[in-house]
C-alpha cells in the first residue's frame, strides 16, 4: 500500500475528486493548508497599498491506494490539477506498512 499526498490549488479540488472517483478511489482525507514553494507568496493590491501574502492557500489530499494503482492515480491527479502555471502543486508517495480498520479490526489491504 502507498500513501499519496497531493498539494493542489483549492479551485481544483472538485476536478481532482471527480478524477479520483473515475479511478475507483473510495476514500480520501482533505484539509485546507497554507504554504509556499518557488513562488514565495504573492503580491496583492488593496486600496492603493501593496501587500505580500507569504502563505498561499492550498488543499492537501491524502489517500492510501494499492501499490499497483500509484501510477494511474498520480497521472489522474496531474491531469485534473494541471493549469500550466507556477503553484499547480506537488504529489508525494510514501510506503504504508500497516493499516487497521477500527470498526472491524481488519488489517492490511483489506482496509482499502
Image: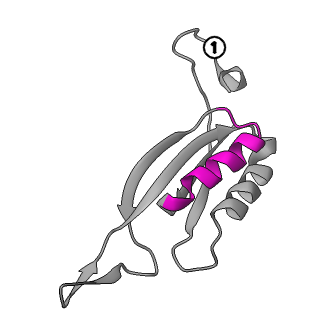
**Residue 93 in view of the camera:** no
Position of 44 relative to 90 (above/below) = below
Determine the residue positioned at 35% across, 81% down: 42
The C terminus sits in image quarter:
top right
- 56 relative position to 90: left or right: left
Q: Nearer the viewer, residue 48 or 20?
A: 48
The residue identified by callout 1 is 106
User: Can you give x and y, in whole percent of width and height, for residue 77 in the image?
Assistant: 68, 56
- 83 relative position to 73: left or right: left
Determine the residue positioned at 55% across, 44% down: 62
The N terminus sits in image quarter:
top right
Label 1 neighbourhood size at 10 Å, few (<14), some (14-19), many (20+)? few
Q: Secondary structure at mark 1?
A: loop
Determine the residue positioned at 68% across, 60% down: 80
The residue most toward the top is 104
Q: Nearer the viewer, residue 81 or 89?
A: 81
Determine the residue positioned at 55% across, 53% down: 13
User: Can you give x and y, in whole percent of width and height, for residue 109 in the image?
Assistant: 71, 26
| Residue 14 painted magenta | yes
Position of 104 relative to 44 (above/below) = above
Q: Main secondary structure of the magenta part?
A: helix
- 83 relative position to 42: left or right: right
**Residue 86 in view of the camera:** yes
User: Can you give x and y, in whole percent of width and height, for residue 70 in the image?
Assistant: 75, 48
Picture quadrant of residue 64: top right
Q: Which residues are magenta?
A: 11-26
Picture quadrant of residue 55: bottom left
Position of 14 relative to 39 (above/below) = above
Picture quadrant of residue 49: bottom left
User: Can you give x and y, in whole percent of width and height, for residue 110 in the image?
Assistant: 71, 20
| Residue 105 painted magenta | no
Amino acid at each position: 500500500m502507498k500513501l499519496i499526498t497531493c498539494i493542489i490549488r483549492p479551485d481544483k479540488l472538485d476536478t481532482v475528486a471527480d478524477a479520483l472517483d473515475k479511478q475507483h478511489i473510495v476514500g480520501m482525507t482533505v484539509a485546507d493548508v497554507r504554504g509556499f514553494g518557488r513562488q514565495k507568496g504573492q503580491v496583492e493590491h488593496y486600496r492603493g497599498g501593496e501587500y505580500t501574502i507569504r502563505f498561499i492557500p492550498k488543499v492537501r489530499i491524502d489517500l492510501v491506494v494499492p501499490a499497483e494503482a500509484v501510477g494511474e492515480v498520480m497521472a489522474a491527479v496531474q491531469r485534473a490539477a494541471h493549469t500550466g502555471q507556477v503553484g499547480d502543486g506537488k504529489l508525494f508517495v510514501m510506503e504504508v506498512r500497516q493499516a487497521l480498520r477500527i470498526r472491524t479490526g481488519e488489517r492490511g489491504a483489506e482496509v482499502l
